[in-house]
Amino acid sequence: MYLQNGSLAIRPATAKDAATLACWWNDGEIMAHAGFPNGIYTTAAEVARSLKTDTDWNRRLILELEGTAIGEMNYRTVADNTAEIGIKICDVCQREKGFGTQYLSMLITYLFDQGDYRKILLDTNLRNIRAQHVYEKIGFRRVAVHMNAWTDQLGVPQSYVDYELIREWFRQLRGCETKPADTEPCLYGLC
């Protein structure tokens, strides 16, 4: 799997990415939204070992901008025809530029078109308003809010929001269901 849209690319994470991933995962600023304000205390060797377990149904991905890694995504099959995804733009200088929306659209299109997926799930911290806006703009619908469902490393109660996206919603929002195959591609050229 290698997805590209202009200067943006998504590719599988490899052992060569282990040091970068470990650095990001150990950075409390990057990981705070996931409940790890102190990072996760991992090593490049541990990350490299875990990457060996990736399959077509459970994969970690690297987000590149002009060939430079700026973040990560992942997807995993959680049930028949259902995947769960996650995304982090780890390079703080590349946040709030619209890249998250584009990367998500690229991966979602791939999963709906290449896989047997009909539904995609994700969750985010209730305080992560920026992410919620992006998810809803793409077509995800809020399914549930879990108040004070867990505590982070500092003992602070955290709440999160569950989202789901059905293949037909995504395609309709993009105008993909009604476009003939020989016309211009829809949003991001990804239908």
Image (cartoon, rainbow, N blue to C red):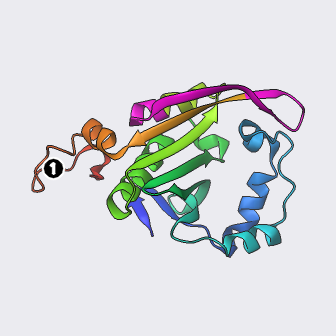
Q: Is residue 85 magenta?
A: no
Judge by depth and name the residue closer to the eye, 125 or 184: 125
Residue drawn at (72%, 68%), measured in percent from left and top?
A: 18
Please say if 1 is above or below 40: below
Count the labels in the image: 1
Count residues near mark 1 (Cα–Cα under 10 Å), then give few for <14, some for 14-19, many for 20+. Answer: few
Q: Is residue 84 left or right of residue 168?
A: right
Q: Where are the magenta residues, as a range?
A: 135-158
Q: Is residue 143 magenta?
A: yes
Please say if 149 is above or below 53: above
Can you say which quadrant of the picture contains the N terminus? bottom left
Residue drawn at (32%, 38%), measured in percent from left and top?
A: 169
Q: Secondary structure at mark 1?
A: loop
Q: Quadrant of residue 6?
A: bottom left
Residue that badge 1 annotates: 184
Indicate the position of residue 61 as horizontal and vertical percent values: 57, 61
Q: Is residue 6 visible?
A: no
Amino acid at pointer 1: Glu
Please say if 42 is above or below 177: below
Residue drawn at (83%, 39%), measured in percent from left and top?
A: 37
Indicate the position of residue 58 as horizontal and vertical percent values: 57, 64
